Image: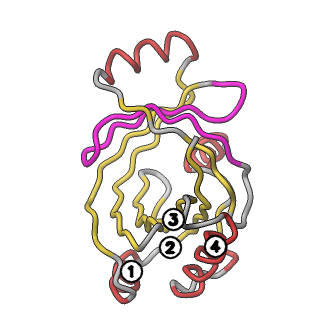
């Protein structure tokens, strides 16, 4: 499995996020409309992502719900026929919920900067530092902390849950 260190925060001013990403020389990768269908599974998470930028992927992942930078283990499995995959997985596991978002992606070295507008939730900023042969877990943790400072993220805006958890909580109110 691949691994990254990630953190997410409420971030109302996406234009300010763009300016800060550009100020450090992050490269704009693209705008992406994503629809993530989450399935009921006992351990970890399983989602089918339909991406206007990258295609369709089945993404199983494991990560704790923490308000600090956290490790996430994941796979990106390309899916050619997403309609059939969605039908099969919904019959096998049942659909938990669907998250729809507009995502602007910036890249800086091994770090992905996501400026997200999530339907029903609002605006967010997410950093994902990819762990690889050149970037240890510790290095990625340090990178994420640096990004939190550069983007002036107040700790009270950090989010420990996934968008799916936030939507579930909202539905329960």
Calculate the distance from the C-alpha at mark 3 to the C-alpha at mark 4: 17 Å
- Mark 3 or 1 closer to N-term? 1
**Is 69 placed left or right of 111 in the picture?**
right
Calculate the distance from the C-alpha at mark 3 to the C-alpha at mark 2: 9 Å
Magenta residue span: 41-63
Residue at 49% of width from left, 17% of height from top? 89
Residue denoted by label 1: 21
Q: In this view, does 79 lie above or below 167?
A: above
- Mark 3 or 4 closer to N-term? 3
- Mark 4 or 1 closer to N-term? 1
* Residue 126 numbered mark, or none: 3
Front disc: 2 or 4: 4
Tell me, yes or no, whether the two marked residues, 3 and 4, touch with CB atoms within 8 Å. no
Of helix, strand and loop, which one carries label 2?
loop
Front disc: 4 or 1: 4
- Mark 2 or 4 closer to N-term? 2
Tell me, yes or no, whether the two marked residues, 4 and 1, touch with CB atoms within 8 Å. no
- Image quadrant where residue 108 sits: bottom left
Q: Is residue 120 above or below residue 145?
A: above
110 falls in the magenta region? no
Front disc: 3 or 2: 3
Of helix, strand and loop, which one carries label 4?
helix
Q: In this view, does 49 lie above or below 141?
A: above
The one nearer the camera, 167 or 17, is 17
């Amino acid at each position: 499995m691949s691994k990254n260190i990630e953190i997410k925060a409420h971030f109302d001013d996406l234009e300010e996020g763009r300016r800060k990403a550009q100020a450090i020389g992050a490269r704009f990768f693209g705008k992406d409309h994503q629809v993530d269908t989450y399935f009921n599974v006992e351990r970890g998470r399983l989602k089918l992502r339909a991406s206007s930028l990258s295609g369709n992927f089945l993404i199983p992942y494991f990560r704790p719900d923490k308000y600090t930078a956290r490790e996430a283990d994941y796979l990106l499995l390309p899916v050619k026929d997403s309609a059939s995959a969605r039908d099969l997985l919904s019959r096998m596991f049942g659909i938990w919920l669907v998250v729809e978002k507009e995502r602007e992606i910036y890249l800086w070295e091994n770090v992905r900067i996501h400026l997200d507008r999530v339907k029903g939730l609002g605006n967010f900023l997410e950093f994902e530092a990819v762990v690889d042969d050149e970037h240890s877990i510790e290095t990625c943790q340090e990178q994420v902390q640096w990004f939190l400072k550069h983007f002036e993220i107040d700790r009270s805006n950090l989010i420990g849950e996934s968008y799916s958890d936030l939507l579930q909580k909202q539905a329960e109110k």
